[in-house]
Image (cartoon, rainbow, N blue to C red):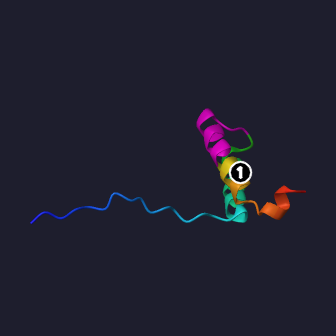
Amino acid sequence: MLHSMSTTVAAAPERSAAEVNEEIRALWIRSGGTLSVEQREEYQRLVMEWAAAVPQSSKAA
């Protein structure tokens, strides 16, 4: 008997802006204030995630 596998990908739960901000702060602390190329890429990804997580009312300010 063959069983079919689901091809849908469960979306990862979205993090709050505060959670992402904490990760950004930790990245800066770990880096000592100077980001490597890899860390800059991670920082850019985190900033985009943070911007998407900021409540809409805060974006209009």
The answer to whether residue 18 is left or right of residue 5 is right
Residue 5 % position (x, y): 26, 61
Location of residue 58 by image quarter:
bottom right
The quarter of the rendered structure image containing the C terminus is bottom right
Q: For residue 26: magenta?
A: no
Q: Nearer the viewer, residue 11 or 26?
A: 11
SS category of the residue bearing label 1 = helix
The majority secondary structure of the magenta stretch comes to helix
> From the viewer's perspective, is 51 left or right of 42?
right
| Quadrant of the rendering where the N terminus is positioned | bottom left
Span shown in magenta: 34-45
In the rendered view, tell whether residue 24 sits above or below residue 55: above
Q: Residue at x 69, y 55 (%)?
A: 52
Which residue is at a point 62% across and 39% down the rendered structure image?
41
Position in image of residue 38 (x %, y %): 58, 37
- What residue would you read off at disc 1? 29
Residue furthest to the right in view is 61
Looking at the image, residue 9 sits to the left or right of residue 38; the answer is left
The answer to if 36 sits in the magenta stretch is: yes
Residue at the outermost top position: 37
| Residue 42, horizontal then vertical, whole percent | 61, 44
Name the residue located 79 percent from the left edge and 61 percent from the top edge: 56
Q: Looking at numbered disc 1 in the image, what kind of residue is underneath it?
A: Ile
Who's the residue at 87% across and 56% down the image? 60
Q: Residues within 10 Å of mark 1 (few under 14, many from 20)?
A: few
What is the total number of numbered labels drawn onto the structure image?
Answer: 1
